[in-house]
Amino acid sequence: MAPISRLPIISMFLASLFLASCATMQHVSELSNVKFTLDRVSDVRIAGIDVMNFSDAQQLNVYQVGRITLATARENLPLDITLHLKTENPVINQVAATLTRMEWTLMLDGRDTISGVLQDQITLQAGETSDIPLRLSLNMFQFFDEKNALDMLDLALAFAGEGGGIPQGVALKIRPTINTIFGPFTYKPILIEPRPKERSQRRTF
């Protein structure tokens, strides 16, 4: 009996690897086409005080002013915000992209501040937009030169904005990771800056 040629088997194996590689590259390109934008901010708090609907420091009551002043004296003035990242997966992709991890760094006026990792699995459906809320917290004394309580409050109010607009000088550096048939794929850092200046954007940090 003639020996069975292994060439067809090897050819089929190589063809399978080639098709799998093409499928992986297609899946990887899906996320590269996804658009990331800074959409808005919400739930802005300074020293635990909700200032989302405040336009200036004069709206604070005596208790709130005292609380911020005390936190300033201790040089521990926490600013908590929720930054909403909007993703748009083009309908041309036809399939969903799965975001499994995203490293992020908040940048203020070109300076790196706080960093973190989003580890929620998020499915980005083709032709749809998704909202990714990032809950950020930083001690303002670590990143700003102002030492006066009211000056610090003014900086915090810049995040509140009108209608949750992104203040000038705010940017986000992200490094997303997606799943592929060969395992997770991590991209190079992507810098996301706010849209051109709008009325809702206040001061530059």
Image (cartoon, helix red, strand yellow):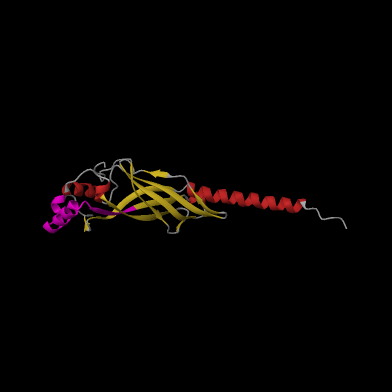
> In the image as oriented, which residue stretches furthest toward the front?
74
- Residue 130: horizontal and vertical position, in percent? 40, 55
- Residue 97: horizontal and vertical position, in percent? 49, 54
**Is there any visible trace of residue 161 in the rendered image?**
no
Q: Nearer the viewer, residue 24 or 155?
A: 155
- The total of numbered circles placed on residues is 0
Q: From the viewer's perspective, is residue 188 above or below residue 129? A: above
Q: Residue at left 77%, top 50%? A: 7
**Is there any visible trace of residue 6 in the rendered image?**
yes
Quadrant the C terminus occupies: top left
Is residue 10 found inside the magenta-colored segment of the image? no
Q: Residue at left 39%, top 50%? A: 104
Quadrant the N terminus occupies: bottom right
- Residue 204: horizontal and vertical position, in percent? 26, 41
- Region in magenta: 57-83
Q: Residue at left 23%, top 49%? A: 156
Is residue 75 found inside the magenta-colored segment of the image? yes
